[in-house]
Image (cartoon, helix red, strand yellow):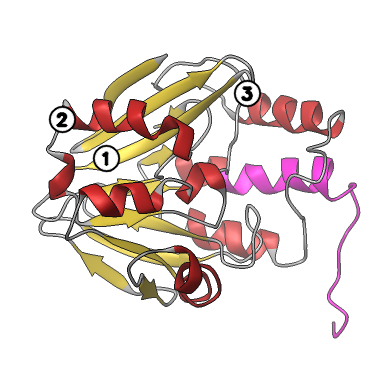
Amino acid sequence: MVNVSEIAPDVYRISIFASEFNLQFNHFLILDDEPMLYHTGMRQMFPILREAVAKIIDPAKIKWIGFSHFEVDECGALNDWLQIAPNAQAVCSEVGAMVNMSDFAIRPAHAMASNAVLNTGKHNYRFIKTPHLPHGWDAGVMFEETNRTLLCSDLFHQNGKLPDITDKDILSLHRKSLLEFQESPLMDYAPYTYKTPKLLKQLADLNPKTLATMHGSSFNGDCSAALMDLDTIMKEVLGGGYEIVPANS
């Protein structure tokens, strides 16, 4: 059910496979002077994840709790973590802090503007605002600049029980997963808009070495090329294959 591996220096992937969904839920613990947990997991998974974290670090020492957007697998157990880590603080987008965390979290969140940097010791995290990518007004991703790890949330979502990390093709698996969603109530998984290519290009320009994905294998191949190619798949499956042009063009 639970698998732990170090996918990049100081970055521990804690994966919980839910067979009923045929889906891995991945959480990332990054060790530093001020440790970060990225993805809190669902509340029902909190005891399992806490036990896994405790084998690596005392959970009370967690300082930062990051996530992309307001969704149960991203931040559902946030308050459980805030209760066992007395100095911990959620870190998210300005929109997320204002609209969601101001009511949901038991302590104020640290709001980050796009391109703001958070230092946790030897690691620097650059926050990139990505509204509606993969989904949610409040969405954003964090790029760990020291080892060039992109914590990319639901981007590159892959169904199934898969290896911890790979340098093989993950785009075909992502496309297959999106098509499977088209046949389910999850068909409107993510929007595709005229802003999507620009946002993916912005992430590709970071030149990541590792893509830390929420669902499925993490990736350590040509990450920039994968991000650029992701636009083609999202446009085909989610955008209907049509060119989307802004109204003022």
Residue 201 drawn at (x, y percent): 57, 59
Q: Earlier in the sequence, mark 3 or mark 1?
A: 1
In the image, residue 16 above or below residue 111? above
In the image, residue 223 sits, relative to residue 176, either above or below, namely below
Q: Is residue 192 left or right of residue 203?
A: right
**Rendered location of residue 162, percent (x, y):** 50, 16
Q: Quadrant of the C terminus?
A: bottom right
Image quarter of residue 11: top left
Q: Are marks 2 and 1 in contact (CB under 8 Å)?
A: yes
Identify residue type, mark 2: Ile
Q: Secondary structure at mark 1?
A: strand
Farthest bottom residue?
248
Which of the marked residues, 2 or 1, is nearer the chain's N terminus?
A: 1
Identify whether 12 is placed above or below 137: above
Label 3, on which residue?
A: 159
| Mark sitting earlier along the chain (3/2) | 2
Q: Which residues are magenta?
A: 227-249
Residue where numbered disc 2 is placed: 56
Indicate left or right for 107 with 41 as reference. left
Q: Secondary structure at mark 3?
A: loop
| Residue 167 visible somewhere in the drawing | no
Q: Nearer the viewer, residue 77 or 112?
A: 77
Q: Look at label 3 and name its amino acid.
A: Asn
